[in-house]
Image (cartoon, rainbow, N blue to C red):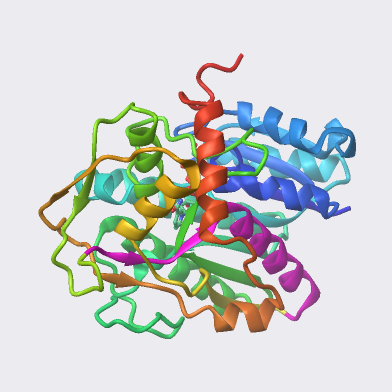
Amino acid sequence: MKNILITGGTGYIGSHTCIPLLEKGYRLTIIDSSVNSSPISILKVKEILKDNFKDELITYYPGDIRDKPFLSSVFLKAKELKKPIQGVIHFAGLKAVSESLLKPLDYWHSNVYGSICLIEEMLKYGCRNIVFSSSASIYESSSFIPILESSKINPSTPYGQTKVAIENILYSTFKSSKNSWRIANLRYFNPIGAHESGLIGENPLDIPNNLFPIICKVANGKIDKLKIFGNDWPTYDGTCIRDYIHIMDLADAHCAALDFLLKNEPQIINLNVGTGIGTSVLDLVNKFMKVNDCKVPYKFSERRKGDLPFIVADNQKLTATLGWQPKRNLNQMCKDGWKWQMANPNGFIDIN
Ligand SMILES: NC(=O)c1ccc[n+]([C@@H]2O[C@H](COP(=O)([O-])OP(=O)(O)OC[C@H]3O[C@@H](n4cnc5c(N)ncnc54)[C@H](O)[C@@H]3O)[C@@H](O)[C@H]2O)c1
C-alpha cells in the first residue's frame, strides 16, 4: 500500500481528493497549517467512507511546509514506520488571486519558498513523484478559443506568477536529476461544488473570493447581492466565460494522474484540468437558481482589473493521457454545492 503525502490536505480540493485516493487503496499522510481550512474535514472524510475506512490509513500532522525540521520529521517518521512517502500531491499554498495583488510577498513565500522546502525534503528522502496544483491563471488568454497546454504563459497576478515559478522549479529539478522524477503539473480551471454527501465542501476562512462560494452565500442571505464584474464583455451575454469542473471530477483527476505517473517512465507533464465547456457568469447564476429553486440577487458593476472574457480548457491532452473524462455536469455542481452550503452555512465552524 503506497503512502502519499498530501500537503494542504484539509483544504477544499485536498479533502475531496482524499476520498478517491483512500477508495483506491492509498495510505495518506496529510500536512496542513490550517491557514485556510479546518482539520474537521478529515473527520468528515472518515465519516463519508464509514465502514470502508481504517483509522490507520490517514496520519495528520498540523504544520507549515516552510518549517523544514517539521517537514523532515514527517518524512523521517514515515520511513521509520516502514511506510515511506512514495508520492506527493502538493496542494498547500495561498490561493486568493486578488489578495496576491495586495500581499505579493506572502504568496511568494508561502507558495514558492514552501514548494522549495518540499522539493528539498523529497530529494533528501528519495521521493521523486509529485502531482502539483497549478492553475489556469498562468495563461495569457487573449482569444476565444480553448486554451492548450502549449498556449502562451503570461500570468497577470502574483498568484499566477508563483504557480509559473513552481512549475519552472519542478522543471529544472527534473532536468538536473537525470530525468529521474515523475511530475504532473495539473492546471486547474474552475473547481466548484462539493462531495455529494454535503459533508465536505469549500470552507474559506475569510470572505470568499471565487464566484461559486459567493453565489452560495448570496443564496443563503449571508451576502446581500452578487456583484457581477462587467456586462459589456464581448461574449454572448456580456459576462465572463469560465470552465467549471465538479470538485469530485477534479479529485478523480488527481487519482488518475498519480496512477499514471506511478505506472509510467519518469517524465514531466502539464495537463489542463477542465471540462472544455464554457459557461458565462449569468448562465451559472441562472442554473444555480433553477436547480436549487432559490434566489440569487445580483447587480452589475465595473469590469475588474485583470479579468479576461474567456478562459476555457482544451482538455484533450488530459483525457487522452489519463484515459479519463470528467463525468458530472453543471446541474450536479450547483446541486452538490448548495447541499453543502445548506447543511453547513458557517462552514466547519459550527461543528464540534
Ligand atoms: N480552488 C481553485 O479554484 C483553484 C484553482 C487553481 C489552483 N488551485 C490551487 O489548488 C491548491 C488547493 O486549493 P484549494 O482551493 O483547496 O485551497 P484551500 O485554501 O482550501 O487549500 C489549501 C490548503 O493549504 C493549506 N496551506 C496553505 N499554506 C500552507 C503552508 N505554507 N503549509 C501548510 N499548509 C498550507 C491551507 O490551510 C489549506 O488547507 C492551491 O495550491 C491553489 O492555489 C486552486
Magenta segment includes 105:
no
Res 67 visible? no
Name the foreground residue: 269 vs 327: 327
The image quadrant of residue 243 is: bottom left
Image coordinates of residue 22 in percent, x first then y, are 79, 47
Residue at 18% across, 74% down: 234
Say left or right for 112 vs 182: left
Image coordinates of residue 137 in percent, x first then y, are 35, 65
Magenta segment includes 257:
yes
Say left or right for 86 vs 135: right
Name the foreground residue: 255 vs 124: 255
Which residue extends farthest left? 302
Image coordinates of residue 14 in percent, x first then y, are 60, 46
Name the foreground residue: 241 vs 89: 241
Residue at 40% across, 81% down: 146
The image quadrant of residue 320 is: bottom right
Which residue extends farthest top? 352
Task: Tell me the chief SS of the magenta region.
Answer: helix
The image quadrant of residue 54 is: top right
Up-down relation of residue 183 to residue 231 (above or below): below
Say left or right for 11 vs 75: left
Numbered range of the magenta stretch: 239-265
Res 208 visible? yes
Tell me the quarter of the image containing the C terminus.
top right
Name the foreground residue: 289 vs 11: 289
Residue at 61% across, 62% down: 131
Up-down relation of residue 146 to residue 127 (above or below): below
Image coordinates of residue 166 in percent, x first then y, are 44, 63
